[in-house]
């Protein structure tokens, strides 16, 4: 009977840990979604002509961080950047930080 009790306790702990991890992941996803929506709003506001891309000047006026990293984001050297360009830069930055973390 003690063996059954230990197995049930382990199962309960595993379920609790899994539920906690799922909740944390959901919160992280919600946070990412919120930041993504905020970034899209700021991008749209900076894109004064509404063509879906920012020039260096538009970035300078409306998105200082993007302006600061414009050349890094504009990997194709088109002179304009899009939301997917910014997203790719952000992913690369996150990955670089992860690889530095022990």
Image: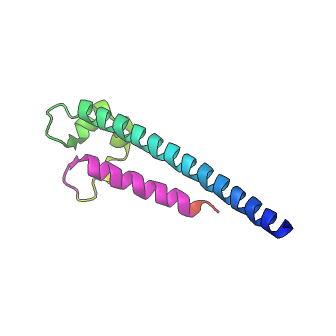
Confirm whether the magenta stretch covers residue 44. no
Say which of 89 and 25 sits in front: 25
Q: Is residue 39 left or right of residue 4?
A: left
Q: Is residue 65 above or below residue 19?
A: above
Assign the N terminus to one quadrant of the image.
bottom right
**Total numbered labels:** 0
User: Residue at coordinates 33% horizontally, 35% vertically from top-left?
Assistant: 63
Where on the picture, by quarter, is residue 12?
bottom right
Say which of 14 and 84 sits in front: 14
Q: Is residue 16 left or right of residue 26?
A: right
The residue at the far front in this view is 1
Q: Is residue 64 left or right of residue 13?
A: left
User: Residue at coordinates 67% horizontally, 59% vertically from top-left?
Assistant: 14
Say which of 22 and 60 sits in front: 22
The residue at the far right in this view is 2
Assign the C terminus to one quadrant of the image.
bottom right
Residue 54 image position (x, y, % from top left): 22, 41
Residue 89 image position (x, y, % from top left): 37, 53
User: Residue at coordinates 53% horizontally, 56% vertically from top-left?
Assistant: 97
Residue 52 image position (x, y, % from top left): 18, 42
Say which of 1 and 50 sits in front: 1
Where on the picture, by quarter, is residue 38?
top left
What span is in magenta? Answer: 77-99
Q: Is residue 2 left or right of residue 92?
A: right
Confirm whether the magenta stretch covers residue 98. yes
> Magenta segment, principal secondary structure?
helix
Residue 46 image position (x, y, % from top left): 25, 32
């Amino acid at each position: 009977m003690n063996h059954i009790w230990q197995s049930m306790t382990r199962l309960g702990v595993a379920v609790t840990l899994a539920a906690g991890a799922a909740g944390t992941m959901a919160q992280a996803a919600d946070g990412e979604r919120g930041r993504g929506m905020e970034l899209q709003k700021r991008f749209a506001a900076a894109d004064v002509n509404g063509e879906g891309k920012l020039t260096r000047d538009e970035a300078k006026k409306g998105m200082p961080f993007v302006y600061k990293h414009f050349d890094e984001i504009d990997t194709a050297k088109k002179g304009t950047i899009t939301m997917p360009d910014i997203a790719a830069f952000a992913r690369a930055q996150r990955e670089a930080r992860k690889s530095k973390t022990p």
